[in-house]
Amino acid sequence: MKIYDSLSGKVYEIVSKNITVYNCGPTVYNDIHIGNSRPVITFDVLIRFLKSQKVQVQYLHNLTDIDDKIIKRAKELKQTESQVATTYIEHYMDILKALNIMPMVMPRVSENIPGMIDYIERLIKSKSGYVTENGDVYFDVKSISNYGVLSHQNLDQLQEGVRKELATDKKSPLDFVLWKKTETGLNWKSPWSTGRPGWHTECALFINKYIGDHVTIHGGGIDLKFPHHENENAQNNALYKRNIADIWMHVGHINVNNEKMAKSLGNFILVKDLLAKYSGNDLRWFIYQTKYENPLDFTDDLLTQSCNELNKIFQQMNQGFIQMYLQKVKIVKTIASVDKEFVTIMNDDLDIPNAKAFIWSQVKKLAGLIRSKKFDKFQKQVAIVKAELDILGIIYINPLDNPEIKSLIDEWNLALEQKNYVLSDKYREQLIVKKVL
């Protein structure tokens, strides 16, 4: 499989059948917006596809449950930080389930403080971390030779863009915190002071703890590229003299009115609000409109359009099964592999939009098979499409597996036979509402 590496700007070919993947997770001070969901959906498709190709995957997705934003939110809600974090982690898990995200290892910061203290100790011993008189610990970006390699900037360029701090005990404005001395909010005792770890150390430690000195693919939203991913990479270079990832896979923003969606801008749309009107299938299908690294525009019209397109795909699949049922044609459970062309498309830098278009072209063939009553071929074709939809995390359920739907179909058919068209229209409307027809 070929994946674009945003560090080198080149396409990297994965040949190993055993890989590791790390995708940065949310800071749990609020519910996630649709922009936050794009990386986790994208990486879910990546994992599903790799596993379908018999690749062994170890996948980590962290939860940041210690942060200034959580402290602020706790004060607003008059709750403890732990209560806030627990609430929003539960909400996040509900959303992942609704979006049909596969299970993954999800370490929490608060449960890994001793490991982070040890990791910071190692950075200090390597002469990359230093302790200030105040008890803060910083990373010295000049201690490594390639700081800025991921964001494609050198130290001079980066320093030009940093505000000069008036009172600081940092060696350089670019140096970032490894341990923050504080008694505000949750805090722990360390060899340097009472405080808590810096954000950039979390993911570096998790990769080191659960995977090793590097990960095959590391990713997240494009907004994390600098400084978060750059600073993760710097710490790994200090300890292991190598980049923390073979491939950096950055997912593009979702924009509203050509502006990046963000909580800080107040233009965000919460996933939980969208799930009140649309299904997880609908949101996933919408996300698949553009390549993962490109920006994606959000509008209600585009989401509705995606929803309608997916309904048409399901309706075409349903039509064949309903006809078979009404004509008493034997329905068998068919297991099929994905089409080779689908695999080729997905192997090309996870080209989900083209994979989506390919599935649509396969679905269009179903109409002809239904008309010609080639139901054996229809069932095989549906099985192939279903296997491909599974890789995209789209859930298709045969309507005949639902006794209530099957009963409605019987009533609808009986009303048609009796030429009771008012009643048949009533049943038909019910099937349409349930998105069977």
Image: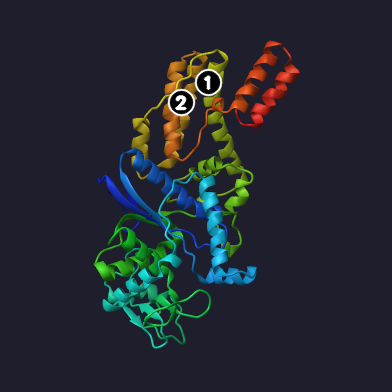
Residue in the picture at 55% in, 17% down: 325
Front-lying residue, 296 or 239: 239
Q: Which mark is residue 382?
A: 2
Query: What residue is disc 1 on?
Result: 320
Front-lying residue, 7 or 410: 410
Q: Quadrant of the C terminus?
A: top right
Amino acid type, mark 2 = Val
Q: Is residue 351 visible to the viewer in this orientation of the structure?
A: yes
Which of the two discs, 1 and 2, labels the residue nearer the N terminus? 1
Q: Quadrant of the N terminus?
A: top left
Q: Position of residue 227 (x, y in %)?
A: 41, 67
Amino acid type, mark 1 = Gly
- Are there few (<14), some (14-19), or many (20+) residues within 10 Å of tag 1? many
- Are there few (<14), some (14-19), or many (20+) residues within 10 Å of tag 2? many
Q: Position of residue 203 (x, y in %)?
A: 38, 63
Q: Which mark is residue 19?
A: none
Which element type, helix, strand or loop, lies under badge 2? helix
> Marks 1 and 2, Cα distance to the nearest angstrom?
9 Å
Relative to residue 203, is residue 327 depicted above or below? Answer: above
Q: Position of residue 363 (x, y in %)?
A: 48, 27
Front-lying residue, 429 or 64: 64
Q: Is residue 151 visible to the viewer in this orientation of the structure?
A: no
Image position of 70 (left or right of 225): right
Check whether the beta carbons of the residues at disc 1 and disc 2 lie within 8 A of each other.
Answer: yes
Residue in the picture at 64% in, 27% down: 431
Residue furthest to the top in view is 418
Which element type, helix, strand or loop, lies under badge 1? helix
